[in-house]
Amino acid sequence: MRISVSSDMDEPVARLLVTELRDRGHEVLTHGALRAGDDPQWAACSSAAARDVADGTSAMAVVCCWTGTGASIAANKVPGVRAALCTDAYTADGARRWNDANVLALSLRLTSEPVLKEILDAWFAGEASEDAEDRGNVARIEQLDDGRAMP
């Protein structure tokens, strides 16, 4: 699977993320501080990775900044993206299951190597729920992307 990864800082956890994804057999497209000459600002690189998902260049993305908050906000401004800030495996599983999240946001400050691997395990094991209520909520988010008011 092709996955876009962005980080506003060239931190050890960001480099580990890229290595871990490649070791799991994924093709990785980098943005921000992980790509020479790219804009490292969190708003720019996170939205670039999110646009890769929205336009089909990548199946998913992982966006990183110091807290993960700015990266998730920027990614969620891209129509078609459902980014979730995850600090643990339970949240990552729920984001995939109940929210059909397609962008994972991570904190460079809080994410250790063992936690990163647990989050990635849960993220990739998770699948979108087929429950009518869960699908309905995702459909409402898609209406917001289209500029339609939610009923």
Image (cartoon, rainbow, N blue to C red):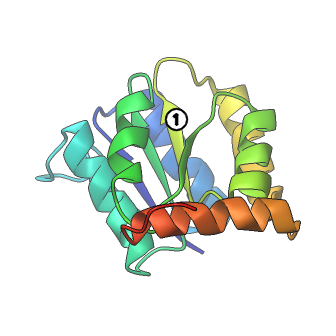
Give how far across and how far down residue 19 sits, in percent: 54, 50
Q: Residue at x 58, y 25 (%)?
A: 111
Give how far across and how far down residue 89 sits, in percent: 77, 36
Q: Is residue 118 left or right of residue 32?
A: right
Crowding near the residue tagged with mark 1, few <14, some 14–19, many ≥20 C-alpha atoms within 10 Å: many
Say which amino acid is labelled 1. Leu
Q: Is residue 40 left or right of residue 136?
A: left
28 or 69, nearer to the observer: 69
Q: Is residue 119 above or below residue 52?
A: above
Q: Residue at x 45, y 38 (%)?
A: 14
Which residue is the extreme one toward the right? 131
Give how far across and how far down residue 78 sits, in percent: 34, 60
Q: Which quadrant of the figure contains the C terminus?
A: bottom right
What is the quadrant of residue 99 in the picture?
bottom right
88 or 7, nearer to the observer: 88
Q: Is residue 142 above or below residue 134?
A: below
Q: Is residue 83 left or right of residue 63?
A: right
Residue 129 visible? The answer is no
Which residue is the extreme one toward the top? 109
Give how far across and how far down residue 86 sits, in percent: 63, 35
Which residue is the extreme one toward the bottom? 56
Q: Is residue 29 left or right of residue 119?
A: left
Residue 97 visible? The answer is yes
According to the picture, the residue beneath numbered tag 1 turns out to be 106
Q: Residue at x 29, y 32 (%)?
A: 9
Q: Residue at x 14, y 48 (%)?
A: 39
Q: Which quadrant of the figure contains the N terminus?
A: bottom right
Looking at the rendered structure, the secondary structure element under dot 1 is strand
